[in-house]
Image (spheres, grey):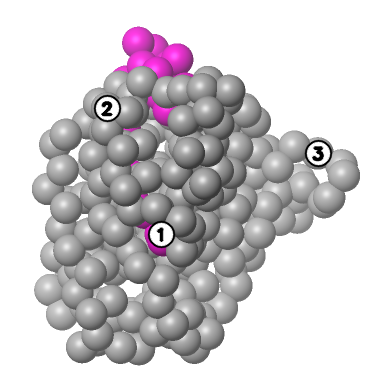
């Protein structure tokens, strides 16, 4: 079973990437679980066209007792149909109310729930994709790397400084916990935001980290329109260039064996390196 962590700053488009990756894996006949790991419950929206209950909410209602819970209580099956037997399952970790707890608590409880209810084995899951906020300073959000649940990590980024900074934080976590957990960096997935010299910048950045770019996603109105319809581009615009691009990214991730321990930059080093590209 492959367990993949997909990190990135809020709003960078990682949930869209995660959902399209799930779709391409299911097309291969695999059983895939997308685990949304944030206080919101919208990671899996394109696969469900609805917002499922969060694991943390379900646990609260049951006083955090697992005896009366079943996988169906926290796992929602996507209605998407794949003729070769592929299936997509969805779950959302959720989080505490604003101002009263750590956002990563939901991630901790969600992963514990997967283990205690033996969900991955019960459903015969082939691939898990954790869709996670890039704030790995929080212990909960770093859990898939820190505890080795995800053996390969990808980061969705752009040429914006904030996005690159989150990449460096994720890389620091991978490097720090490599000896204990063994998680590696599989590469960057670039979601272009029309920053000056952006493509050259992220290409140089990947080289500096010692990793690769798995895919480059141009700004696309088609992707936005499909998301507004609550669908992936595979459903909404199956003949589009965007659908072909996401399939190519899915193929590269599926085939990827180039997993590395990255060489992250410090904050000051990153800023001094980034600034000349936008001047």
- Cα separation, mark 1 vs mark 3, equals 31 Å
Q: Position of residue 209 (x, y in %)?
A: 33, 28
Figure check: 1 above or below 83: above
Q: Residues within 10 Å of mark 2 (few under 14, many from 20)?
A: some
Q: Are marks 2 and 1 in contact (CB under 8 Å)?
A: no
> Residue at the location (47% across, 62% down)?
193
**In front: 203, or 185?**
203
> Residue at the location (75% across, 37% down)?
102
Figure check: 218 above or below 205: below
> Which residue is identified by label 3?
101
> Which residue is identified by label 1?
191
- Cα separation, mark 2 vs mark 1, equals 19 Å
Which tag, 1 or 3, sits closer to the chain's start?
3
Q: Is residue 155 visible?
A: yes
Q: Residues within 10 Å of mark 3 (few under 14, many from 20)?
A: few
> Which residue is identified by label 2?
210
- Cα separation, mark 2 vs mark 3, equals 36 Å
Which tag, 2 or 3, sits closer to the chain's start?
3
Figure check: 255 above or below 73: above
- Label 3: state its secondary structure: loop
Q: Is residue 7 visible?
A: no
Viewed as shown, does residue 60 lie left or right of 161? right
> Residue at the location (58% across, 23% down)?
268
Q: Within the magenta stretch, is there residue 92? A: no
Q: Residues within 10 Å of mark 1 (few under 14, many from 20)?
A: many
Viewed as shown, does residue 120 lie left or right of 215? right
Which tag, 2 or 1, sits closer to the chain's start?
1
* Residue 231, picture quadrant: bottom left
Viewed as shown, does residue 19 lie left or right of 100? left
**Magenta residues, start to end:** 171-192
**Looking at this rendering, what residue extends furthest in the right direction?**
99
The label shown at residue 42 is: none
């Amino acid at each position: 079973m492959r367990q993949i962590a997909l990190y990135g700053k809020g709003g960078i488009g990682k949930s869209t990437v995660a959902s399209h990756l799930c779709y391409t894996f299911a097309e291969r006949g695999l059983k895939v679980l997308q685990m949304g790991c944030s206080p919101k419950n919208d990671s899996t929206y394109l696969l469900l066209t609805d917002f499922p209950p969060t694991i943390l909410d379900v646990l609260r209602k049951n006083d955090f007792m697992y005896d009366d819970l079943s996988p169906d209580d926290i796992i929602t099956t996507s209605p998407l149909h794949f003729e070769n037997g592929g299936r997509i399952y969805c779950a959302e970790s959720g989080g505490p109310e604003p101002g009263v707890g750590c956002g990563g608590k939901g991630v901790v409880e969600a992963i514990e729930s997967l283990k205690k209810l033996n969900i991955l084995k019960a459903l015969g899951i082939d691939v898990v994709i954790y869709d996670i906020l890039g704030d790995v300073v929080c212990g909960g959000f770093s859990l898939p790397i820190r505890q080795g649940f995800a053996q390969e990590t990808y980061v969705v980024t752009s040429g914006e400084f904030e996005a690159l900074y989150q990449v460096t934080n994720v890389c620091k976590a991978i490097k720090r916990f490599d000896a204990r957990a063994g998680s590696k960096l599989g590469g960057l997935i670039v979601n272009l935001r029309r920053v000056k010299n952006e493509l050259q910048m992220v290409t140089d950045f990947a080289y500096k980290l010692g990793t690769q770019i798995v895919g480059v996603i141009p700004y696309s109105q088609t992707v936005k329109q499909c998301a507004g319809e609550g669908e992936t581009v595979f459903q909404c615009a199956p003949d589009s260039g965007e659908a072909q691009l996401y399939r190519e990214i899915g193929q590269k991730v599926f085939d990827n064996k180039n997993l590395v321990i990255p060489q992250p930059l410090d904050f000051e080093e990153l800023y001094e390196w980034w600034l000349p590209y936008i001047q």
